[in-house]
């Protein structure tokens, strides 16, 4: 099962590089839009939609990277008060519940993409499934990271 930890680390590395690319692209698109609007007095019709889509992808993928780094918002005040043995059981329970939530994210994300399959975005004209594909994708990445964290805890 060591391959699960390696896969989780590699996927996270890919996600973090993608986050840089998406963030840079969003800043570039927004900067070009501001330049065109205020200097050239011509607005780019597609830039707001592209920037919004990039922001959504950054948000969902950024959440997976934060989860992997254990940098996400968490309230562990109650968990820290337990002695070490019950604390591990509580943490494993929380991770199990998280797995369930992440599976729901994948399942309903896929259902939603099927629901909007025939629609296209207003400005760019791309299928709506592309911007919304980040929902089940991030759910899969969350599942991978949570499973690797469970494996790490069980190994200790």
Image: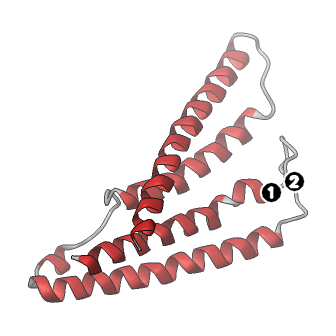
Q: Is residue 69 left or right of residue 36?
A: left
Q: Nearer the viewer, residue 135 or 68?
A: 68
1 or 2: tag closer to the N-terminus: 2
Q: Are marks 1 and 2 in contact (CB under 8 Å)?
A: yes
Query: In which quadrant of the rendered view does residue 4 lie?
Result: bottom left
| Disc 1 secondary structure class | loop
User: What residue do we see at 69% from left, 10% from top?
Assistant: 39
Say the numbered circle drawn on residue 128. 1
State which quadrant residue 89 falls in.
bottom left
Whether residue 128 is situated above or below residue 117 in the rendered picture: above
User: Does 43 sit left or right of 147 as displayed?
Assistant: right
Q: Is residue 114 left or right of residue 146?
A: right
Residue lying at the far right of the rendered structure: 118
Count the marks.
2
Rendered view: 99 above or below 53: below
Locate residue 95, reporting x and y percent: 37, 79
- Which image quarter: residue 129? bottom right
Residue at 22% over, 73% down? 76
Which numbered tag is attached to residue 115? none
- Tell me where residue 65 appears, x and y as whole percent: 43, 54
Label number found at residue 120? 2
Q: On the rendered image, what quadrant is the N terminus found in?
A: bottom left
Residue at 57%, 29% in the rendered image? 27
Q: Most extreme residue toward the top, as rendered?
A: 39
Using the numbered discs, state the Cα–Cα distance from disc 1 to disc 2 in whole angstroms. Answer: 5 Å
């Amino acid at each position: 099962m060591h391959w699960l930890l390696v896969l989780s680390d590699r996927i996270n590395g890919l996600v973090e590089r993608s986050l840089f690319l998406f963030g840079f692209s969003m800043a570039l698109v927004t900067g070009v839009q501001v330049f065109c609007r205020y200097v050239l007095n011509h607005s780019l019709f597609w830039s707001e939609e592209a920037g919004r889509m990039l922001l959504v992808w950054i948000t969902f993928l950024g959440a997976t990277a934060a989860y992997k780094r254990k940098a996400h918002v968490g309230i562990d005040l109650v968990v820290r008060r337990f002695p070490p043995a019950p604390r591990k059981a509580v943490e494993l329970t929380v991770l199990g519940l998280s797995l369930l939530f992440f599976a729901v994210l994948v399942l309903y994300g896929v259902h939603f993409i099927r629901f909007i399959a025939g629609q296209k975005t207003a400005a760019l004209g791309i299928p709506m499934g592309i911007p919304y594909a980040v929902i089940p994708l991030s759910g899969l990445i969350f599942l991978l990271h949570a499973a690797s964290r469970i494996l790490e805890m069980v190994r200790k």
